[in-house]
Image: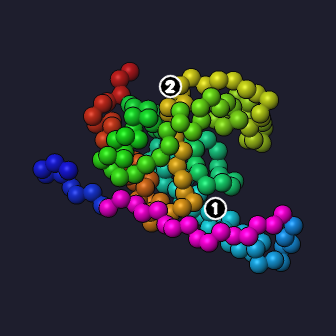
Amino acid sequence: AGPGSAALPPPLKRPRPSDALATSSSCDAASPLEAHLDVLRLAYARKADLLSTRLKSLGFTLACEARGGFFLLVKLPDACPVGATELVALAEKDHLVSFLPGPRCLGELTARVLPGEGQTSDGVMNPQEDFARSASELDRWLRVCFAMYAHGDLEAAASRIGAAVTAASKAQPVTK
């Protein structure tokens, strides 16, 4: 940090993975494994909700509400003058937070991932609709992990990503 700038908080720490769970495709609803999975589902749902709510409050758009998984796919605010690929470098260097830019995680994925054409009436993507997205459109999206972090870290991560967008906007204003 240069003279007169505020010191950044320490980087977020990734927790150590817990012991691997035994898996079984034939566990009943009363089994200890199923009970543990229910606890994990609730914990992940709360984390996804916390992160999605915070990112939406900062102007990001969700591809869809999380129904499972470990990541959110979000679109940069329209006011952000740079793409996710450029933003991640700034976010990592100056704000000590990271995410995966759209081109790295979406590649040539299609309507199955991003909202719009190919979406069925219930919001589920239709894999039969297969059309390419342009690289610049993919670079407006980013994938953010919520599963590995505590609630406070998720709030901090969203704030840091928002701060990176603000910094990019100040350094390179949107031109129309």
Can residue 47 be seen here? yes
| Residue 21 is a magenta residue | yes
Question: Which residue is denoted by mark 1 in the rendering?
Answer: 45
Which amino acid is tagged 2?
Ser
Residue located at (58% from left, 44% from top): 73
Foreground pick, 71 / 55: 71
Q: Along the horizontal axis of the image, is 12 left or right of 21?
A: left
* Spot occupied by residue 136 in the image (x, y as percentages of width and height): 50, 25
Residue located at (42% from left, 63% from top): 13
| Residue 23 is a magenta residue | yes
Question: Which residue is denoted by mark 2 in the rendering?
Answer: 136
Q: Is 17 above or below relative to 120?
A: below
Q: Is 53 above or below relative to 139?
A: below
Which amino acid is tagged 1?
Ala
- Badge 1 or badge 2: first in the primary sequence: 1
Residue located at (38% from left, 21% from top): 176
Near mark 1 (Cα within 10 A), the count class, few <14, some 14-19 or many ≥20, is some
Does the magenta stretch mainly form a helix, a strand or a loop? loop
* Spot occupied by residue 46 in the image (x, y as percentages of width and height): 60, 64
Q: Along the horizontal axis of the image, is 8 left or right of 122?
A: left
Residue numbers of the magenta segment = 10-25
Instruction: Report if the CB atoms under discs 1 and 2 are less than 8 Å apart.
Output: no
Residue located at (47% from left, 46% from top): 99
Can residue 151 be seen here? no
Q: Is 34 above or below relative to 104?
A: below
* Spot occupied by residue 127 in the image (x, y as percentages of width and height): 77, 33
Disc 1 from disc 2: Cα separation: 31 Å
Can you tell which of label 1 and label 2 is closer to the viewer? Answer: 2
* Spot occupied by residue 161 in the image (x, y as percentages of width and height): 41, 48
Residue 167's quadrant in the figure?
top left
